[in-house]
Each structure stands twice: as structure tokens, then as C-alpha cells.
Image (cartoon, grey):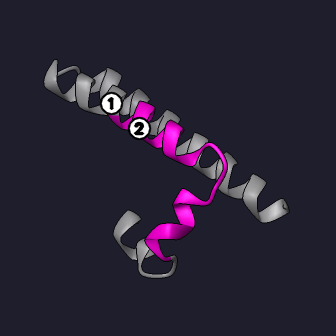
């Protein structure tokens, strides 16, 4: 899903979304930490949280 969506939006678009860089860094760190701990449940939760947060940020940007 991510790969296909990136072809429709330039990389700089995401950096222009308010809160995106911070959320991305924080969320990706949580996902990677869970993977390193081999904690599948925590990784799944962190990824789901990240997807929901990204969706909210993109919806807010669209509404602006």
C-alpha cells in the first residue's frame, strides 16, 4: 500500500503535512523497537496506530 501510494504523491508532500515528520519518526521508532524485541503483538499495535495516525494527519491536511 505504501509503495503504491508514494507514486501518487511526491516525497516532499508528506513533509508538508503538519505533524507528519514528528509522528513518522516516533511511530517508526516504536515499530522498529517492537520488531527488535520480537514482540509481534506490540509491532502489530504500533503499525496499526501509525496507519490510523497517518490517516488522521492526511485527512486534516485535505480539509485545510
Query: What residue is rendered at 51% in x and 34% in y?
Result: 49
Horizontally, residue 18 falls left or right of residue 1, namely: right
What residue sits right under mark 1 in the picture? Answer: 29
Q: Where 31 falls versus 58 (above or below)?
A: above
Q: Give residue 30's position: percent from left, percent from top.
A: 35, 26
Horizontally, residue 8 falls left or right of residue 18, namely: left
Q: Nearest the camera: 54 or 45?
A: 54
In the rendered image, the residue lying farthest to the right is 64
In the rendered image, the residue lying farthest to the bottom is 8
Query: What residue is rendered at 25% in x and 32% in y?
Result: 32
Q: Give residue 2's position: percent from left, percent from top.
A: 39, 64
Q: Quadrant of residue 14?
A: bottom right
Q: Nearest the camera: 35 or 58?
A: 58
What residue sits right under mark 2 in the picture? Answer: 25
Q: Give residue 53's position: percent from left, percent from top.
A: 59, 40
Disc 1 residue crowd, few under 14, some 14–19, many 20+, Cα 10 Å: few
In magenta, the rendered stretch is 10-28
Q: Secondary structure at mark 2?
A: helix
Q: Where 33 falls versus 1 (above or below)?
A: above
Amino acid at each position: 500500500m505504501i509503495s503504491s501510494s508514494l507514486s501518487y504523491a511526491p516525497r516532499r508532500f508528506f513533509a508538508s503535512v503538519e505533524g507528519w515528520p514528528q509522528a513518522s519518526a516516533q511511530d517508526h521508532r516504536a515499530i522498529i523497537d517492537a520488531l527488535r524485541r520480537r514482540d509481534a503483538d506490540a509491532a502489530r499495535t504500533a503499525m496499526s496506530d501509525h496507519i490510523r495516525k497517518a490517516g488522521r494527519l492526511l485527512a486534516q491536511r485535505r480539509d485545510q
